């Protein structure tokens, strides 16, 4: 029995020893808060790039719609001008036609008078040819004295001259009225030609207006499609931003816990413990310049629906030194999607400041900086429409209006 018990103990000991010698699985790696922040930043970056691209597409689509609408408006304005011109031509043509009718009536009357005169002259010429103009001779020969003969001769001469003047006047009137008629006919033909040209232009412009109207509809539909995509991506980026805000808040809690641990360690060691002011009471301007875009809702500079601007934009040239608005610890210093090169400083008390669109970054994560210390150079990186500094203040990860803090 003792031998059996000793054997069992030996087997158990050997089994325990063998189990102890077996290789144990390494504990699963749990990502740190900084790693989570970087992962969230990467996702946000990808979405921001996609959003930026879609906003550019939306902006291009909007510009195309506006351009086509402008062309359509110009075409419609040209149609209105053609319509007005046709109306003026119609009035002019009607007036010319009335004048033409009146002068034609005058011409016909002159022609009838001229025809009558021609008939009388022809009869007189025939009479002269057949009778030798006996009537004129009888008149002259019937004179009782030489002086009466001379008077009758003068009367006949004046009568003949008067007839000739009448004929010439009628001919001149006929030529004048005929010339007026030709001029009016020419004017009428010119008006009709212009009317035809304007009508042709009106037809062409109407067809062009229809085509452009269809293009505007198609472009507007395309813009709507891109706007929907932008809206969907904006919803995703909002979720990523919320996740990032939570991670930043968690990182700030970790920094606060680390600071508390340092104070305890310093107390145990008997040295002066680092203090926590609970956050800055005010912030310094990171650089001097005008505010080109305030905090809050604004017209989207890339097109589409209005968007929320989580900071202020300070207009400044590329390369201007950017200073820390207050003392703190760098918790982000890298490319961050639409922000471009971005620096985020934790100031304690749940307050942090962000600096975006930088051309250069002078600090690194974990570095402690002082108020007014140079941390970067301004630029135009990321989703930016021009050189400026995007400056924001966050309280417990959420953006708030920076202007009341700046002094």
Image (cartoon, rainbow, N blue to C red):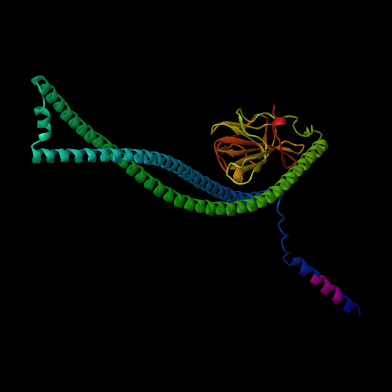
Nearer the observer, 92 or 217: 92
User: Looking at the image, which residue sits at the far front?
Assistant: 144
**Total numbered labels:** 0
Q: Which residues are magenta?
A: 7-15
In the displayed structure, 58 sits above or below 350; it is below
**Magenta stretch encompasses residue 43:** no
208 sits to left or right of 184: right
Closer to the camera, 86 or 144?
144
Quarter of image, res 379: top right
- The residue drawn where x is 72% and y is 65% is 23
The reply to whether the magenta stretch includes residue 9 is yes
Q: Residue at x 44, y 42 (%)?
A: 87
171 left or right, relative to 265: left
Q: Quadrant of residue 335?
A: top right
* Up-down relation of residue 175 to residue 193 (above or below): above
User: In which quadrant of the rendered image does the C terminus lie?
Assistant: top right
Could you say where residue 309 lies in the image, as x and y percent from the top left? 66, 40
Q: Quadrant of the N terminus?
A: bottom right
């Amino acid at each position: 029995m003792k031998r059996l018990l000793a054997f069992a103990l030996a087997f158990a000991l050997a089994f325990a020893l063998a189990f102890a010698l077996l290789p144990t699985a390494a504990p699963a790696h749990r990502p740190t808060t900084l790693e989570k922040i970087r992962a969230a930043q990467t996702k946000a970056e990808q979405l921001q790039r996609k959003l930026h691209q879609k906003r550019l597409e939306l902006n291009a689509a909007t510009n195309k719609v506006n351009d086509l609408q402008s062309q359509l408006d110009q075409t419609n304005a040209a149609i209105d001008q053609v319509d007005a011109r046709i109306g003026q031509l119609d009035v002019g043509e009607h007036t010319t036609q009335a004048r033409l009718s009146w002068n034609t009536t005058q011409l016909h009357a002159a022609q009838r008078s001229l025809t009558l005169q021609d008939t009388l002259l022809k009869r007189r010429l025939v009479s002269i040819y057949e009778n030798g103009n006996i009537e004129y001779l009888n008149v002259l020969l019937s004179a009782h004295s030489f002086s009466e003969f001379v008077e009758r001769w003068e009367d006949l001469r004046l009568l003949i001259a008067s007839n000739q003047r009448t004929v010439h006047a009628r001919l001149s009137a006929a030529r004048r009225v005929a010339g007026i008629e030709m001029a009016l006919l020419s004017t009428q033909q010119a008006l009709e030609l212009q009317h035809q040209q304007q009508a042709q232009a009106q037809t062409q412009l109407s067809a062009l207006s229809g085509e452009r109207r269809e293009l505007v509809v198609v472009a507007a539909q395309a813009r709507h499609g891109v706007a929907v995509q932008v809206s969907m991506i904006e919803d995703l980026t909002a979720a990523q931003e919320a996740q990032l805000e939570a991670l930043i808040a968690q990182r700030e809690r970790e920094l606060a816990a680390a600071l508390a641990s340092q104070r305890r360690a310093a107390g145990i060691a008997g040295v002066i413990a680092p203090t926590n002011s609970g956050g800055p009471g005010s912030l310094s301007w990171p650089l001097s310049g005008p505010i080109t875009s305030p905090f809050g809702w604004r017209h989207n500079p890339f097109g589409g629906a209005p968007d929320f601007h989580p900071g202020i934009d300070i207009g400044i040239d590329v390369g201007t030194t950017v200073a820390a608005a207050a003392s703190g610890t760098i918790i982000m210093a890298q490319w961050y999607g639409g922000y471009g090169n971005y620096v985020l400083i934790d100031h304690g008390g749940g307050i942090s400041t962000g600096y975006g669109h930088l051309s250069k970054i002078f600090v690194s994560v974990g570095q402690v900086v002082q108020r007014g210390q140079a941390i970067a150079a301004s630029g135009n990186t990321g989703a930016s429409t021009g050189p400026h500094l995007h400056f924001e203040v966050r309280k417990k990860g959420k953006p708030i209006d920076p202007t009341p803090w700046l002094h």
